[in-house]
Amino acid sequence: MSRRTLTSWTAAFSMLATFGCTRPSTWEAVESGSVVLAASDRNSVQELLDANSIPATDLPLVDRGAAAGQPRYLTIEGERITELALEGLRESPRIAGFPALEVLHLGGGFVTVEATDLPALRHLQVQGQDDRLAEVRLSGLPQLREAVIGGGRLQRFEAEDLPQLTSLALERLGIRQLPALPQSLTSLSLLANEVTDLSELRSLARLEHLDLGENGLQNVDTLPRLEQLRTLDLAGNPLSTDFALSAHNLPGLRSLDLRRTPLHSAPEGLAALVDLRVRFDSADQARRRFEAMLDRLRRNQKGAPGELVAGPEARSGQFRDTHGDCRWHTGVNQAARVRCSLNFARLEGLAAARLGTTDPAFPFRGGGAPTIEATLRVGSGRVWLYIPTEFDYLTLAAQVENYPLEKAESYRQPADRFQGSRRLLATPESPATVQGTPVLLGSRVLLWLEAIDGPAHDLHLDVRPAD
């Protein structure tokens, strides 16, 4: 398995037929009866489509493997489904009772997913969205060889009766404490999590490949003895200068990846492993990579819309005749989210549009402050729309590339650090759209609007998650 196992689910599905060929059939052919499908398979898929408002025309029927990697497709052989891919699910799916299903890909904003009693399943991929995926339950999958799961804040992972599972990827799931893992694994990817205690890996006696990249690790003191381990990936971790590995614990190690770490040589404890290949960056490579990242961040900042200001000036103002609504929740097992559609007949001076309320002691519980996209339209007048903005690009570049901060400081420019607001001007001819996090003032969640050059009329503010 490669280090980057997760497939991008954002690409639109491209037409499968080549020029001059007929358009591939869709689930409509099953609904009409022109394609015969066993009743249990048909009913199960129809329930998934209905629950998630997916049109029948959005589920193409293709030959085996013809649409691998695409967001949605279905393969039918002998009146049974053998491959199924469904992206864009909103409701938590439970996939069960497909006797011939071999390949299953699921993607969307669900919180839980369950796959059970699938006797032929060999490959499973689950991709969550918006850090919402919190629970995965797998059971009764006797032929499953590979599972790739990512995109969430995983709180519960159950894996039972998976005797053939050898390759597992649990990536970008915010995992801090390792769950119980199948002892049959030979390959495990924990890329981009927050794991620090590795002692639970001691049960994986067959493990040959381990990816711990981008976990914020400074050392791996808790890594147990793994006699069969051949490759260890620690790339992208801020490893400390006294980082150590032991040849005694990893006698079979043949490949060690230390790229994008502060280390530029192999740990002394591995000197006895004469066949070991260690990949690391030279000091010059690390410096060039840091410089490239810093330059990219600076250029992105210069190209961003609007202007940076210290903040709205403290002067009074008010809205008149306000109506509309906001749908708001503060996280729990998923990222905080807000959707608003607010109308103001008149705005004088500086005033705050309230998006919601929250507990000031523990404001966003499960997922951190919401990232929003706000669009302001005005009928007449000129209005600033403010969004809080804070960054330190030099420190960020050093952290991303694991470059020593004391060396990075020599590159600092005044514009690399900022704390205040970004503002965009909305006029009748040009709406203003900004992305960021709203103001948290006590229990209130706010956005600031400021009418300049006199009152503004007929304002409309749309707020949605910045997905």
Image: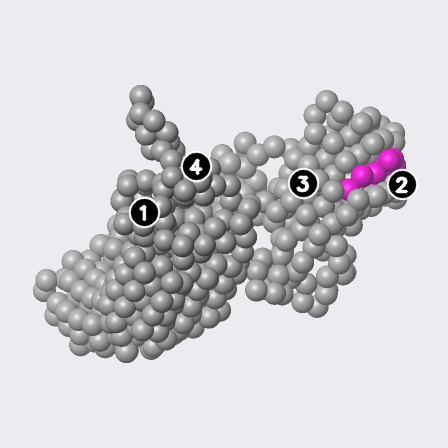
Residue behind mark 1: 76
Residue behind mark 2: 321
Q: Quadrant of the N terminus?
A: bottom left
Q: Secondary structure at mark 2?
A: strand
**Residue 460 drawn at (x, y percent):** 77, 36
Q: Secondary structure at mark 4?
A: loop
Marks 3 and 2, how far apart in space? 20 Å
Colour mode? one colour
User: Which is nearer the eye, 207 or 315?
Assistant: 207
Q: Quadrant of the C terminus?
A: top right
Are there few (<14), some (14-19), or many (20+) residues within 10 Å of tag 4?
A: few
Q: Is residue 421 above or below residue 337?
A: above
Residue behind mark 3: 374
**Residue 159 drawn at (x, y percent):** 36, 71
Marks 4 and 2, how far apart in space? 42 Å
Looking at the image, tell me whether mark 1 or mark 4 is earlier in sequence order.
4
User: Which is nearer the eye, 51 or 137?
Assistant: 51
Q: Nearer the viewer, mark 3 or mark 2?
A: 2
Q: Is residue 193 above or below residue 339?
A: below
Q: Residue furthest front?
A: 33
Looking at the image, tell me whether mark 1 or mark 3 is earlier in sequence order.
1
Q: Main secondary structure of the magenta part?
A: strand
Q: Is residue 287 visible?
A: no
Q: Which residues are magenta?
A: 342-350
